[in-house]
Amino acid sequence: MKEYKFYGHETAGGPKPLTDDLDWLHSPIDLYDALADGLWRRETCAPRMQDEWTPENMTLGQCSITAFIVQDLFGGEVYGILRPGGNYHCYNVIGDAKFDLTSEQFGEEAKDLVYDDVNLQTREVHFEKVEKKARYEYLKQLVYDYRK
């Protein structure tokens, strides 16, 4: 059995997709596997972090666009953890499942993140940034084009 290290991986297998458009998608775990199979890339990383992005740290700069794709596919809410500098790190809450597909970018610091479900995030605010909406659309298209 594959070992997952992202926050909440224990509950991420529970939520079921809202659509059957993607025959390979049965849970957020399947989405994580697809994203880790090369869909997360430098072009989908936040521009300010692209120089630091590597395949070994593939979740770097991918949080909000990933969280909103999870919401598209599985529903639920997107929450944010306020980070130094004023940005929010996004994660998902779907029923009893709380998980963060991109938490591995923080390495050891991930254990200090507080997932308190206080700061609800909206795509209206996040997608005011044209580049972020474009990265979201690009990653979403990669997900829909993905074949196992």
Image: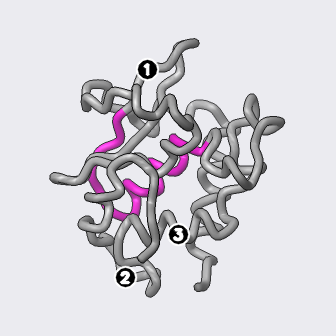
Residue topped by disc 1: 82
Q: Which is more toward the observer, 116 or 75?
A: 116
Q: Amino acid at mark 2?
A: Asp
CA distance for labels 3 and 2: 18 Å
Q: Residue furthest toward the top?
A: 85
Amino acid type assigned to the residue bearing label 3 in the image:
Asp
Q: Write down the residue under mark 2.
A: 20
105 sits to left or right of 50: left
**Residue 109 x %, y %:** 50, 29
Mark earlier in primary sequence (2, 1) = 2
- Select label 1 or label 3 by which is in front: 3
- Position of the N terminus by quadrant: bottom left
Residue drawn at x 40%, y 59% is 72
For the question of whether residue 68 can be seen, the reply is no
Please state which of residues 105 and 65 is positioned toward the viewer in this rendering: 105
Q: Earlier in the sequence, mark 1 or mark 3?
A: 3
Q: Nearer the viewer, residue 2 or 132?
A: 2
Q: Secondary structure at mark 3?
A: helix
Q: Residue at x 44, y 37 (%)?
A: 90
Task: Check disc 3 and report the residue beneath it.
Answer: 33
Marker disc for residue 132: none
Calculate the distance from the C-alpha at mark 1 to the C-alpha at mark 3. 27 Å
Residue type (three-letter) at the residue carrying disc 1: Leu
